[in-house]
């Protein structure tokens, strides 16, 4: 038990990249929004390099500089900047007005490669800018897919980029920058996820991850001379990261093994896996880099679990050492006071097995407890063994938390991921109903003290569950969720619409379905008290969704609270806002679940 602020003041360290020699750069939230910090691994000294109130996301090190992307007040329209390794001056590299987004790709010897929707707001072109003379070229004009640069070959002749038509269909293409000849890495045309290409140092080919013709993502290698691919590594779980060491000696492979990350190091010549220290149970961030040092064989990555706040870790292959290299400054909650979740499973209405994480308060019998059901966003995402402030605080206050990966979640194969598409959307809602039944029948939950909460798609699910199963809930908390799928698709960022229509249905062909599966269609059935939270600058789920939901519910005479942050978007990032948001949500849940 502790103050909710105690769970927020512990900084999270993420997105590590190597600088020169023993210098690393990473993002640290100790002062609020993620900012760039530098650490000398020899001396242990660290220093803050950027001083902004807005979120920094992607980072690259090249040409003796740190290149990074940053948005403004959560609008996700990122611009690209750089800061010198020995300078405090932040320089705009690619900067456009607020309604233009620039996606940082790769940094070469003379060029920075990026995607931009400056020409058409609903489409990304792949561009490059010369860092010597400022000249900008459009290399590839986007047309019927979202095109994003991935990486350039060591000789900067070949550019790899991704074409995305949906979140289940992202395929790698190769553009020769000298001849403009383009090839598709995998000739076959069927839907597949391909990502994370990494070149060999000699430029003879690259490894990449793909689920083509498989349930799970495996490692393949593309040979530059022949244009052929061959399988390198496959298990019955998704590969999430790959990285090639100096001299092309080792291939690091990270696997999502039932929600926990495992690291495997392969010798590239033999394919043999070598023995290394095992990391604890926990998670290496899916959208974060895993990188080798230029000299030696040291692998850098971020790591977290329920009781371990996200930090930077280092695996030294030659010394056989695994160590944490950053610390959570000003942390007032002890690790032993945090709760690791237990991985459980239950059968849904149709017999499908659904995994979920269960957090039980320490020192309390696991029976007849108040329970909050936490639903992740996405829907193509997965709740894993993360440190989540709200969950940890609720558990410390005596509220159990169940966090399911309902059908449609990633991590369990393509078939599982597709089980909630379009007309099957409400089957995921029925998964939550089955979870409530499971928790009450096995004695874990007090049926009169259950809540549902979630953000983004989890917010949509929260509204859907509260309205379609009104007798189950004592209260609900909905954060940046969709109220009406028609208005959501109309007003979400244009470049996101096609990918979302592939899951929910299209405005042109499935309008009635979209209306029917929207929470608004049944909102008059909602009975429990509801808290709605949103950011005014949200480009994914417009704030109008929250405003409309709050207005409708108030007109119906329901008990609803509405909290809007004018300087945030889809993520509540700034420290003062996060404290207010989580404190409000936690107190709301406690007031309804801890009543005798």
Image (cartoon, rainbow, N blue to C red):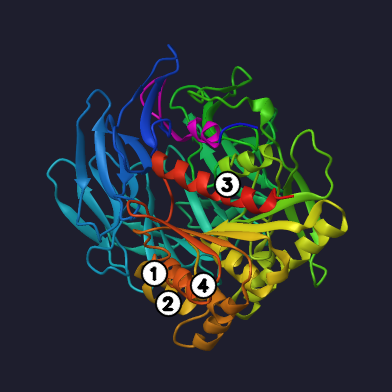
- Nearer the N terminus, badge 2 or badge 4? 2
| Cβ–Cβ under 8 Å for marks 2 and 3 | no
Q: Nearer the viewer, residue 523 or 201?
A: 523
C-alpha distance separating marks 4 and 1: 14 Å
- Residue 279, visible in the rendered structure: no
Q: Closer to the camera: disc 2 or disc 4?
A: 4
Q: Which residue extends farthest right?
A: 442
Residue holding disc 3: 586
In this view of the protein, can residue 54 be seen by the observer? Answer: yes
Dot 4: within a 10 Å radius of its alpha carbon, few (fewer than 14), some, or many (20 or more) residues? Answer: some
Q: Residues within 10 Å of mark 1 (few under 14, many from 20)?
A: some
Q: Mark 3 packing: few (<14 Cα in 10 Å), some, or many (20+)? A: some
Q: Position of residue 548 (x, y in %)?
A: 43, 72
The numbered mark, 2 or 1, whose residue comes first in the sequence reads: 2
For marks 3 and 4, give the CA distance.
21 Å
Q: Quick one: quadrant of the N terminus?
A: top right
**Residue extent of the magenta highlight:** 4-25
> Which tag is nearer the camera, tag 1 or tag 3?
3
Q: Residue at x 21, y 44 (%)?
A: 93
| Residue identifier under label 1 | 544
Question: Label 2 to label 1, Cα distance in Å?
Answer: 9 Å
Q: Which mark is residue 487?
A: 2
> Relative to residue 196, is residue 425 depicted above or below?
below
Q: Quick check: is 14 in the magenta stretch?
A: yes
Pair 4/1: label in front? 4
For mark 3, give the secondary structure: helix
Which residue is located at x 19 percent, y 31 percent?
89
- Cα separation, mark 1 vs mark 3, equals 24 Å
Question: Where is mark 4, residue-wise?
Answer: 553
Work out whether mark 1 precedes mark 3 in sequence or the reverse, and give the earlier one: 1
Q: Position of residue 369 (x, y in %)?
A: 78, 48
């Amino acid at each position: 038990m502790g103050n909710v602020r105690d769970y927020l003041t512990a900084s999270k360290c993420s997105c590590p990249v190597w600088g020169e020699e023993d210098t690393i750069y990473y993002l640290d939230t100790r002062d609020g929004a993620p900012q760039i910090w530098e650490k000398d691994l020899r001396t242990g000294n660290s220093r803050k390099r950027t001083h902004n109130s807005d979120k920094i996301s992607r980072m690259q090190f090249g040409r003796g500089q740190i290149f990074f992307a940053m948005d403004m007040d959560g609008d996700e329209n990122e611009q690209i900047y750089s800061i010198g390794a020995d300078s405090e001056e932040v320089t705009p590299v690619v900067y456009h007005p607020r309604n233009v987004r620039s996606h940082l790709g790769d940094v070469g010897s003379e060029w920075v490669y990026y995607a931009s929707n400056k020409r058409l707001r609903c489409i990304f072109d792949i561009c490059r800018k010369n860092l010597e003379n400022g000249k900008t070229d459009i290399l590839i004009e986007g047309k019927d897919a979202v095109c994003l640069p991935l990486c350039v070959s060591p000789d900067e002749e070949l550019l790899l980029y991704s074409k995305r038509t949906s979140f289940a269909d992202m395929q790698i293409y190769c553009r020769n920058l000298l001849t403009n000849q383009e090839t598709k890495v995998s000739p076959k045309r069927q839907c597949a996820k391909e990502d994370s290409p990494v070149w060999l140092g000699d430029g003879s080919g690259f490894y990449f991850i793909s689920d083509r013709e498989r349930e799970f993502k495996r490692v393949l290698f593309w040979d530059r001379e022949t244009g052929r691919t061959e399988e390198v590594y496959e298990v019955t779980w998704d590969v999430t990261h790959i990285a090639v060491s100096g001299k092309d000696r080792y291939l690091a492979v990270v696997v999502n093994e039932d929600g926990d990350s495992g690291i495997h190091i392969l010798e590239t010549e033999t394919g043999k896996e070598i023995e290394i220290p095992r990391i604890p149970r926990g998670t290496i961030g899916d959208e974060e880099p895993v990188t080798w040092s230029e000299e030696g064989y040291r692998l850098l990555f971020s790591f977290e679990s329920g009781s371990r706040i996200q930090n930077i870790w280092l695996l030294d292959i030659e010394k056989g050492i695994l160590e944490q290299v950053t610390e959570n400054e000003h942390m007032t909650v002890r690790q032993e006071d945090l709760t690791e979740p237990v991985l459980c499973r239950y059968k849904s209405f149709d017999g499908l097995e659904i995994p979920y994480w269960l957090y039980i308060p320490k020192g309390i019998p696991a029976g007849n407890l108040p329970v909050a059901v936490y639903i992740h966003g996405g829907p193509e995402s997965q709740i894993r063994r993360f440190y989540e402030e709200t969950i940890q605080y609720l558990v410390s206050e005596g509220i159990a938390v169940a966090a399911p990966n309902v059908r449609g979640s990633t991590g369990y194969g393509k078939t599982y991921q597709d089980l909630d598409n379009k007309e099957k959307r409400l089957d995921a809602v029925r998964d939550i109903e089955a979870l409530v039944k499971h928790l009450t029948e096995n004695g874990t939950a007090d049926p009169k003290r259950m809540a549902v909460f979630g953000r983004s798609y989890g917010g949509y699910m929260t509204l859907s569950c509260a309205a379609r199963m009104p007798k189950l809930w004592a209260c609900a908390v909905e954060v940046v969720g969709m109220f009406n799928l028609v208005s959501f698709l109309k007003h979400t960022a244009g470049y996101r619409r096609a990918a979302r229509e592939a899951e929910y249905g299209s405005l042109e062909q499935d309008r009635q379905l979209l209306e029917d599966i929207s929470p608004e269609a049944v909102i008059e059935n909602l009975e429990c008290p509801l808290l709605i939270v949103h950011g005014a600058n949200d480009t994914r789920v417009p704030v109008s969704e929250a405003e409309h939901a709050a207005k409708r519910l108030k007109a119906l005479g329901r008990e609803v609270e509405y909290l809007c942050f004018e300087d945030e978007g889809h993520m509540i990032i700034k420290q003062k806002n996060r404290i207010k948001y989580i404190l409000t949500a936690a107190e709301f849940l406690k007031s309804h679940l801890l009543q005798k």
